[in-house]
Amino acid sequence: MIHKKLSLYAEFSEFSRKQIKFFTETFKKYDEDGDGFIDFDELKRMMEKLGEAQTHIALKEIIRK
């Protein structure tokens, strides 16, 4: 796990450790099944929780980009 954290800091050197920790914690919050990916349903629920509910088509467009 430490090796993975060090590589994150090296790969994203433009971000502070505090920012990387925030991004990682936020990602884990929405990656409900813990598989390391945000799938379609998780994205849908995330957008709803953020007050930005999207249509099925709009979500597909977000993913496409």
Image (cartoon, rainbow, N blue to C red):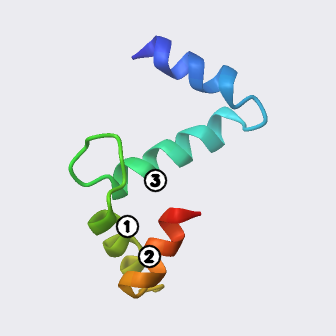
- The type of residue carrying mark 2 is Leu
- Residue linked to disc 2: 59
- Residue linked to disc 3: 26
Task: Name the residue at 48% across, 42% down.
Answer: 24
Task: Name the residue at 44% across, 76% down.
Answer: 59
- The type of residue carrying mark 1 is Leu
Depth order, front residue of 41/29: 41
Q: Secondary structure at mark 3?
A: helix
Depth order, front residue of 23/65: 65
Q: Quadrant of the N terminus?
A: top left
Q: Are marks 2 and 1 in contact (CB under 8 Å)?
A: yes
Camera sees residue 53 = yes
Judge the density around disc 1: few (<14), some (14-19), many (≥20) Cα neighbours within 10 Å. some
**Eyeballing the image, is 23 above or below 18?**
below
Judge the density around disc 2: few (<14), some (14-19), many (≥20) Cα neighbours within 10 Å. some
- The type of residue carrying mark 3 is Thr
Question: Who comes first in sequence, dot 2 or dot 1?
Answer: 1
Question: Who comes first in sequence, dot 1 or dot 3?
Answer: 3
* Labels 3, 2: front one: 2
> Mark 3 to mark 2: distance in Å?
19 Å
Q: Are marks 1 and 3 in contact (CB under 8 Å)?
A: no
Q: Residue 54, position in %: x, y? A: 43, 85
Q: Is residue 14 left or right of residue 29?
A: right
Q: Secondary structure at mark 1?
A: helix
Question: Who comes first in sequence, dot 3 or dot 2?
Answer: 3
